Amino acid sequence: MMEQRSDPPQLAMGTSPSPPATMPSEAEPAVTRSVLVTELVEKMLGGAQRPLARLISMVEREEPTAPSIIQQLYPHLGKAYAIGITGPPGGGKSTLVDRLTALLRKRGLTVGIIAADPSSPFSGGAILGDRIRMQQHYLDAGVFIRSMATKDSHGGLPRSAKDVIKLMDAAGKDIILVETVGVGQTELDIVETADTTIVLLVPEAGDAIQTLKAGLMEIADIFVVNKADRDGADRLIAELRLMRELKHGQDSWDVPIIATQAHQDIGIDELYTTIEAHRRFLEESGELHRRRAQHRRNELWEIIEHKVRQRLTQRARVDPKLAALVEQVMQAQVDPHTAASRILDDTDTVQQWLMPGSSRGGPLDEPAGEDERH
Ligand SMILES: Nc1nc2c(ncn2[C@@H]2O[C@H](COP(=O)(O)OP(=O)(O)OP(=O)(O)O)[C@@H](O)[C@H]2O)c(=O)[nH]1
Ligand SMILES: [Mg+2]
């Protein structure tokens, strides 16, 4: 499709804070914006790439229209299959994603790629490297690539990644590949997001795995030992097998261990066959349905937590009483537990915080609020 060809910098856009020139301006009336959104969603559902890119940007920036975007595309979800690939920095995740994408395209499947880049000084370089590596896919209208900055320097997925997956799903992508750098706990994000989670390890990481192994077993649906051309690959595979033995019988899915050499395209076919087998296992056992239901429930709590926190921080900015309490905590004059109880026990504050529109007048014009704690 010409549209993507004329708009190649989608990867860079994901991490760039500056909106594309075609974005609605801040001053644009809400009605115009909602008409625009509906139009964009329709075009995106028809498979157009540029509206997809624009909607992703809106969702990523948490614009006021973001919830209505998701609401509109919600009936069109559920066809895509999401595969998460997590592992240490430089392990070969992007190379693997590139090779898997080539394989999927040969089989006539369309692909969405989300590359979560740690917000580190190196990420600029990683994005550039990925762009060069995945050049062939940038020219392919059946592939949509998006890079997103991660929550923190250790990796993990940005909160909006789940919505970006929804957008790609609604846009008709068959398979969505999500690459995240996993260091310790951050892999959990991907488990909460993907249908199949691949944990990629490399021989060099052998020792680090010792400390992580129990956790990794919980996370992985499939282990990939990439850079199998390097020394220590056999040892790593043996260690993983041993871990699996110990866990054997607890689950009906025995986590496969696949050796790959992504840069040489070795092992990719076997990996995809294994992914398909896992998908079949999830579908036939009803586990896919359960997993997705759980993900949706957790996502609901996440959204609520995020909003509650966001509103409270906003409120602390405009409510002098709350701001003063926060300051007292910062100065160690009040302990955080006492302060938290005081906030949560204050009916007026809680009401204003959870339902900002519930009373006339802003928090600052509400002199009655001054003596709410007596
Ligand atoms: N020897 C060897 N090198 C590989 C293999 N797979 C990938 N590489 C190389 O490893 C380097 C890092 O690969 P990437 O695909 O960028 O790794 P990544 O995990 O995406 O890295 P980050 O996204 O920066 O964390 C590149 O130079 C690849 O060519 C492999 O199987 N064997
Ligand atoms: Mg990468």
Image (spheres, grey):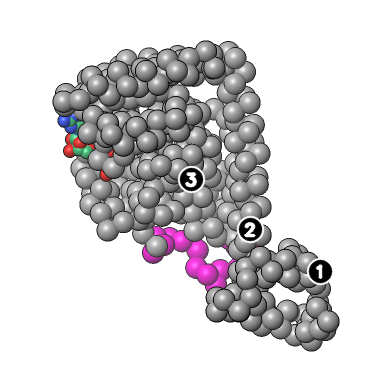
**Kind of residue sitting beneath label 1:** Thr
Name the residue carrying label 2. Answer: 307
At 45% across and 33% down in the image, what residue appears? 215
**Distance (Cα) linking label 2 and label 3:** 17 Å
**Kind of residue sitting beneath label 2:** Lys
**Distance (Cα) linking label 1 and label 3:** 35 Å
At 59% across and 74% down in the image, what residue appears? 329
Place residue 30 in its image quadrant.
Answer: bottom right
Q: Is 160 inside the magenta-drawn segment?
A: no
Residue 279 vs 307, above or below: the answer is above
Residue 234 vs 356, above or below: the answer is above
Question: Does the image show residue 252?
Answer: yes
Secondary structure of the residue carrying numbered label 1? helix
User: Does label 1 or label 3 sit earlier along the sequence?
Assistant: 3
Q: Residues within 10 Å of mark 3 (few under 14, many from 20)?
A: many
Instruction: Name the residue nearer the viewer: 87 or 232.
Output: 232
At 71% across and 83% down in the image, what residue appears? 364
Disc number placed over residue 347 in the picture, else none: 1
| Magenta highlight range | 18-35
**Kind of residue sitting beneath label 3:** Ala
> Do tag 2 and tag 1 residues touch (Cβ < 8 Å)?
no
Name the residue carrying label 3. Answer: 161
Q: Check the picture and name the quadrant holding the C terminus.
A: bottom right
For residue 359, side relative to residue 116 (left or right): right
Place residue 110 in its image quadrant.
Answer: top left
